[in-house]
Image (tube, rainbow, N blue to C red):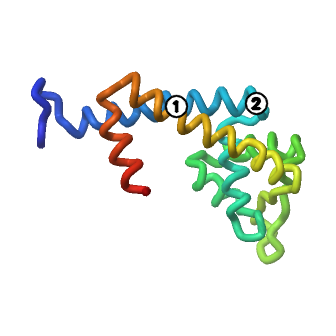
């Protein structure tokens, strides 16, 4: 296993840097979305998954998997989105046990409004992380270059 000069396994150091970056960026995104749009980060991401889904609907299990949440967490999330009239629940016509979450026009509009904020905050958070923590700059450069 490769190590750094101080003896720390390089994979462990890299993973620690990635988790630090992730925590920092997620915190910034969550704060900005809540303040400007009244959305939690998971709510924003759920709306985004629904925007991209065929017919703007997903089974609860698909939404949970896409968000990395357990069933009870996604149920609470969908309840909040429904209370805000961003989604509604529908029963699967082929399998009455299956429940879909369906995006409303209001949910689509809120996601569209919040998207620019999300993207601007993400870029700013990544840029700040690279400037404040030079050890993260190579990770960010590599990741950004691989998507260009």
Note whether 32 is above or below 42 in the view shown: above
Note whether 95 is above or below 10 in the view shown: below
Query: Dot 2 corresponds to which residue?
Result: 36
Identified at 88% across, 41% down, the residue is 83
Identified at 46% across, 33% down, the residue is 127
Q: Nearer the viewer, residue 122 or 99?
A: 122
Identified at 76% across, 30% down, the residue is 36
Q: Is there any visible trace of residue 19 in the rendered image?
A: yes
Element assignment for label 1: helix
Apparent side of residue 104 relative to residue 8 in the rendered image (left or right): right
Residue 132 placed where, x, y %? 40, 22
Identified at 83% across, 50% down, the residue is 109
Q: Is there any visible trace of residue 72 in the rendered image?
A: no
Residue 81 circle label: none
Note whether 22 is above or below 103 in the view shown: above
Apparent side of residue 74 relative to residue 38 in the rendered image (left or right): left
Q: Quadrant of the N terminus?
A: top left
Residue 119 placed where, x, y %? 61, 42
Apparent side of residue 35 relative to residue 8 in the rendered image (left or right): right
- Give the mark nearest the N terminus, 2 or 1: 2
- Classify residue 120 by image quadrant: top right
Q: Nearer the viewer, residue 44 or 80?
A: 44
Query: Dot 1 corresponds to which residue?
Result: 125
Note whether 68 is above or below 6 in the view shown: below
Element assignment for label 2: helix
Q: Kindly give the residue lying farthest to the bottom in the view shown.
A: 94
- Classify residue 69 by image quadrant: top right
């Amino acid at each position: 296993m490769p190590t750094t000069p101080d003896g720390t396994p390089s994979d462990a150091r890299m993973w620690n840097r990635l988790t630090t970056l992730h925590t920092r960026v997620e915190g910034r995104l969550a704060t900005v979305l809540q303040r400007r749009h009244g959305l939690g980060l998971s709510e924003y991401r759920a709306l985004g998954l629904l925007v991209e889904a065929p017919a703007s609907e997903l089974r609860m299990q698909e939404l949970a998997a896409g968000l990395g949440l357990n069933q009870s967490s996604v149920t609470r999330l969908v309840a909040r989105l429904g209370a805000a009239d961003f989604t509604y629940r529908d029963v699967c016509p082929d399998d009455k046990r299956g429940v879909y979450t369906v995006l409303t026009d209001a949910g689509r509009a809120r996601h569209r409004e919040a998207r620019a904020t999300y993207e601007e905050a993400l870029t700013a958070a990544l840029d700040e992380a690279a400037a404040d923590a030079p050890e993260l700059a190579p990770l960010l450069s590599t990741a950004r270059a691989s998507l260009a």
